Amino acid sequence: MPRTARASVGGICYHVLNRGNGRAQVFHKDGDFVAFVELMAAACRRLPLRVLGYCLMPNHFHLVLWPRGDEDLSLWTIAIT
């Protein structure tokens, strides 16, 4: 069962992470990492959001994001998928 959506407030930094189910890999080859970074860049063009840092590993990723407005974090994560 998915988690309930959380409210996000602009002007606050967020640590966002996601893991593969059962520690399964989410990035299988180098091109997957590149494609993910390109998706983040495209999402930033659609909805500017400050990406302070990110770390991509084969089975999960971490993002440090700083949205400007309320609900921008949710809108940006929709834009990346």
Image (cartoon, rainbow, N blue to C red):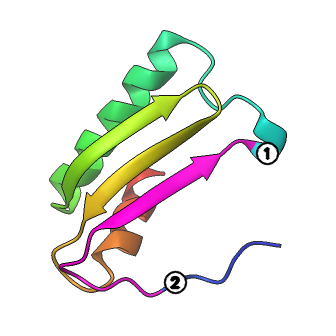
What residue span does the magenta drawing correspond to?
A: 7-20
Q: Residue 55, located in which quarter of the rendered image?
A: top left
Compared to 3, does 26 lie above or below? above
Q: Residue at x 37, y 83 (%)?
A: 8
* Magenta region includes residue 16: yes
Q: Which sits in the foreground, 50 or 53?
A: 53
Judge the density around disc 1: few (<14), some (14-19), many (≥20) Cα neighbours within 10 Å. few
Name the side, left or right, on which 74 lies relative to 29: left
Could you tell me the amino acid type at mark 2? Answer: Arg
Query: Residue 44 in magenta?
Result: no
Residues marked 1 and 2 touching at CB (< 8 Å): no
Q: Secondary structure at mark 1?
A: helix
Residue 53: name its quadrant. Answer: top left
Q: Which residue is mark 2?
A: 6
In the rendered image, residue 29, in percent from the top left (x then y), is placed at 56, 12
Residue 72, numbered circle:
none
Q: Locate residue 79: give its quadrant.
A: bottom left
Q: Which residue is mark 1?
A: 21
Work out which quarter of the rendered image holds the N terminus and state it.
bottom right
Kind of residue sitting beneath label 1: Asn
Residue at 46% across / 14% down in the picture? 31
> What number of labels is visible?
2
Relative placement, left or right, of 29 versus 34 is: right
Q: Residues within 10 Å of mark 2 (few under 14, many from 20)?
A: few
- In terms of sequence position, does the residue under pointer 1 or pointer 2 come before the other? 2
Please name the residue shown 23% across and 51% down the image.
51
Q: Position of residue 10 (x, y in %)?
A: 22, 82
- Reply above or below: 28 against 69: above
Q: In 3D space, how far apart are the residues under numbered discs 1 and 2 (Cα atoms)?
A: 21 Å
Secondary structure at badge 2 equals loop
